Image: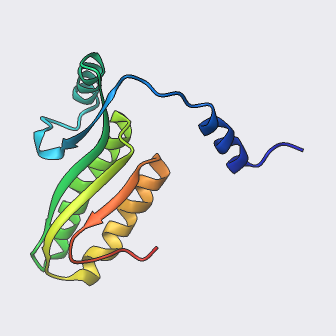
């Protein structure tokens, strides 16, 4: 019988060794693009400089009570989830201020959180709403 997936993960973690790379937090606003070519070059330059992205922070705006604007903003956040996964960031933090309609925003951000989980990226929400776990 083979080991369970969690036992395999634990065994892999036990074999980890520290590296001489400095974890850094990236601000999504500082990215010129989320295109794979740009992200590939950025990841290379970060590595060459001795850095490894650990967190990608995104500021999101949900202060309009408009389904189209909510969807546009969630699509933007989803693009940054993909960018975080591509860069190898461990976590994406979504900061949002006022939320006009939490009933529209919460399910959309929950879908982003699920997408992040499938991509192997932690999802943290910093704002006036929370996601049910």
Question: Could you tell whether 118 is left or right of 88 in the image?
Answer: right
Question: Could you tell whether 112 is left or right of 13 in the image?
Answer: left
Observer-nearest of 23 and 27: 23
- Residue 68, given in percent of the width and then of the height, sits at 17, 70
The furthest residue to the right:
1
Instruction: State whether residue 104 is above or below residue 50.
Output: below
| Residue at the (21%, 41%) spot, across then down | 26
Q: Splitting the image into 4 quarters, where does residue 50 fall?
A: top left
- Residue 117, given in percent of the width and then of the height, sits at 46, 55
Question: Could you tell whether 20 is left or right of 41 in the image?
Answer: right
Question: Could you tell whether 27 is left or right of 9 in the image?
Answer: left
Observer-nearest of 24 and 33: 24
- Residue 130, given in percent of the width and then of the height, sits at 32, 76
| Residue at the (26%, 46%) spot, across then down | 56
Q: How is the image coloured?
A: rainbow
Q: How many marks?
A: 0
Q: Splitting the image into 4 quarters, where does residue 2 fall?
A: top right
| Residue at the (38%, 41%) spot, across then down | 85
Observer-nearest of 52 and 66: 52
The furthest residue to the top:
48
- Residue 106, given in percent of the width and then of the height, sits at 31, 75
| Residue at the (11%, 39%) spot, across then down | 30
Image quadrant holding the N terminus, namely top right
């Amino acid at each position: 019988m083979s080991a369970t997936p969690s036992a395999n993960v634990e065994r892999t973690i036990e074999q980890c060794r520290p590296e001489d790379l400095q974890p850094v937090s990236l601000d999504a606003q500082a990215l010129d693009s989320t295109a794979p070519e740009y992200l590939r070059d950025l990841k290379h330059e970060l590595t060459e400089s001795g850095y490894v992205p650990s967190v990608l922070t995104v500021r999101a705006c949900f202060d309009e009570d408009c389904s189209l604007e909510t969807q546009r903003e969630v699509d933007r956040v989803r693009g940054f989830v993909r960018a975080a996964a591509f860069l190898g960031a461990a976590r994406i933090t979504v900061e949002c201020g006022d939320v006009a309609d939490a009933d529209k925003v919460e399910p959309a951000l929950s879908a982003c959180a699920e997408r992040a989980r499938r991509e192997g990226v932690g999802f943290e929400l910093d704002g006036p709403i929370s996601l049910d776990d």
